[in-house]
Amino acid sequence: MSYRTFNGIDISIMKYLAGNDKHASAEKNKQYYIASANKTMTRLELARARIRNAFLSEKDNKFLIDKILYGLNWLDMLKNNIKDAKDDIEFSKAVSYTEWHAVKLIPSAAEGYAISLIMKDKLNDRNNTSHAKLLEDAKYHNHKAKIIFTELLNLKENSNFKLAEKQRIKAYKELISVNEILKRL
């Protein structure tokens, strides 16, 4: 569904996957969207398991799990709305592509947020005065990553998802920089 949120992609070509029978096509669309929702739900469940095993503070754990549960609940509601849609008009109203994109970003943003918290603890445990500048740089990169992941976890329907995808990649690059510095400390 995320391709629908990007400008410049003509989705009319998707008709070639739908088949020729209009009724069969509507049912295939329902099956496709429900399967896609199930896939996203599985990814959210994986993120939840990873978060639970990350040994985060109770507050941070609750924040991330609440975001994940929001995504799971929203997808459950979406699946019910898709199943209940009687025609293409109801189906179109049932599916919010922008909200779906926001929900699809939750797992990787939650995991990135958790990684930044774990790395912060590792950085705070280091008292290496001979590498003070490196430590300061790592803390800076880690802080930038956490801010970006927080923004991604708080996306709304009117957010710029093209920018959000770029920001997600940028945040993970920040964490890679932190990891490289941690290896040197």
Image: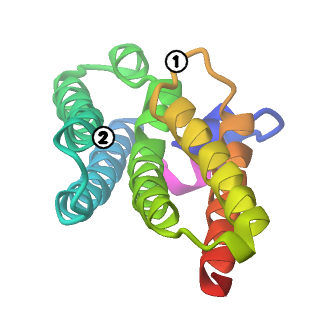
Tell me the element at label 1: loop
Task: Please give the label number shown on residue 20.
Answer: none
Is residue 123 at all visible to an observer of this figure? yes
Residue 158, relative to residue 138: is it above or below? above
x and y, in percent, of residue 98 in the image: 53, 26
In front: 9, or 70?
Answer: 70
Q: Is residue 105 magenta?
A: no
Residue 178, relative to residue 61: is it above or below? below
Q: Residues within 10 Å of mark 1 (few under 14, many from 20)?
A: some
Is residue 19 at all visible to an observer of this figure? no
Residues in magenta, as a range: 13-21
Tell me the element at label 2: helix
Residue at the spot x=56%, y=30% of the render? Answer: 151
The answer for how far apart the CA atoms under marks 1 and 2 are is 22 Å
In front: 109, or 83?
Answer: 109
Residue at the disc numbered 1: 157
Direction from residue 135 to residue 53 in the image, left or right: left
- Location of residue 54 (image quadrant): bottom left
Which circle's residue, 1 or 2, is located before the other in the chain?
2
Direction from residue 12 to residue 64 in the image, left or right: left
Residue at the disc numbered 2: 30
Q: Look at the image and tell me in which quarter the C terminus lies.
A: bottom right
